[in-house]
Image (cartoon, grey):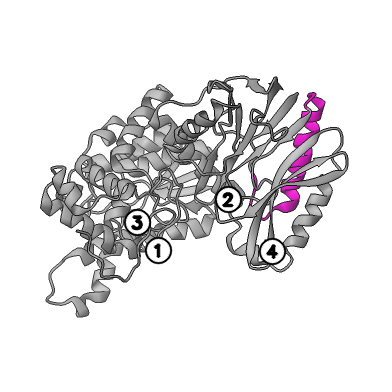
Amino acid sequence: MKIAIYQMDSTAGAFASNADKIIAAAETARQQGADMLITPALSLVGYQLQGLSSYSKLNKLIRSQIKRLKEIKGISVIFGAIERQKNQIVHQLFASYHGKIQLIFSQEYNGNSNCYIEITDKKSKSPLIYFDNSPFSLTHYKKTQDKLQKLAKKRSVLCVRPAGGQDACVFDGSSFALNARGELSFQAAFNAETIEYIELQDNDFSGSLKVRPETDEELLYNIAVQGLKNYVTKNGFKKLCLGLSGGLDSALVLAMAVDCVGAENCEVLLMPSIYTAEISNTAAEKMAQNLGVRYESVPIWEIYQSFKTALAHRFDGLPDDLTEENLQARIRGTLLMALSNKTGALLLSTGNKSEVAMGYATLYGDMNGGFAPIKDLYKTQVFAISRWLNIYKNQEIIPQEIIDRKPSAELRPNQTDQDSLPEYEVLDEMLYNILENNATPKDLIKQGFDENEVRQTFRRLYAAEYKRRQGAIGTKLSNSAFGIDWTIPLTHKFKPE
């Protein structure tokens, strides 16, 4: 039996166009001699309809497209949908064959659409199909494979996964099959919407084995670019813009932007002040030139002075402090938003996860933007991916001087990030333990971290939640993405021990 696996990229609520894609894929698979086409869970409706599922005519709209799929000829098709039943949403799988639609799976949908079905009959050794609709994280693929290997010791298992993405979530394809001995017998393409073919013979699956990236850096970069591309294309954007500071975060985001829409569709502003080091200007220019991106320098010092003059009567006698630093960031944010409004380009925010965790960013300033590609990457990961990128591209995409510099916001003389934060290697290890492993202050202190730094990290992590709630969405890359996996109340009195 020849089976086609469609790693489909569905769009939430686009029921008709999703149906069009399933019909086209079925015809392609039929022409290739396939007996069955299997699409991912929720293929007809898209991932996470959220509040759209309360629409009064939802069932009618979905059923009209199911009726269209009923007309597919010459091949059986498995597809997924939802139905609103009284006060609950039900996740469903259907099989279309010979002009008939059969419901083959139904259960209450609680945000997790992962499920098993038997592909032939109820015999203990009949193959299983596992519909995995969980978004990408570094550990998810391996955990899924390990889980299914336990089942595959008794029967073969096929794992069907979508590609593409929805909002902050990316689905990395990589559908796979395990034979009854638990060995990998089929591996579909990574991070691509494709139709691939496998054979089912004597209750075992077999097919081609595509390469899946092995390094964290390649996985994370490709998924981050894909997440940005999903958001850009599905929301109708053509161009991207950002502020290029001469620092590492904005440099990596620019590289991602160019890989997403091309250099000709990207534009950056350099916005130096008197605190901006000359190396920042030259490195930023070099970065833009390396990628062939249009850039312009718009100094902010005169604008900054005019703001201070406007507020001089109110600030008279008060020393300069964080207010003046944040004012510079907000001027830059205003200029970038103006560029975005005027050109229709999507403004990218360039904060990394370490900064987002610690509130080391300015609301209505460098947090401005419609999408934040690296908000789920720790600073140490940003360094590692940037080094990898230059090696992978076999050229200096990100100037080495940017990678080698000490990170700085350059909002006051001789400022570095470590004036306010622990060394990033230390900070990121603490944050990872807190966010991924639910470590308490006592746990970290027992592991040997400095008690003052631990207490300060927890305090700032909790205090910055109000900023995170107002920040742009960004691609989920871990099991602890802010706003998706990890949130806390804005108002609380909880103190972890």
150 left or right, relative to 352: right
Task: Give the Cα distance between marks 1 and 3.
Answer: 12 Å
Q: Is residue 215 above or below residue 373?
A: above
The span picked out in magenta is: 10-34
Q: 437 or 344, which is in the foreground?
A: 437
Answer with mark 1 or mark 2, whichever residue precedes in sequence.
2
Cβ atoms at labels 1 and 4 below 8 Å apart:
no
Task: Give the Cα distance between marks 1 and 4.
Answer: 34 Å
Q: Residue furthest bottom?
A: 313
147 left or right, relative to 306: right
Classify mark 3: helix, strand or loop: loop
Cβ atoms at labels 2 and 3 below 8 Å apart:
no
The answer, for residue 223, to whether it is visible in the render is yes
Q: Which residue is mark 4?
A: 85
Quarter occupied by the C terminus: bottom left
Q: Which residue is mark 2?
A: 237
Question: In x, y percent, where is residue 143?
Answer: 45, 35
Q: Residues within 10 Å of mark 1 (few under 14, many from 20)?
A: few
Residue 195 quadrant: top right
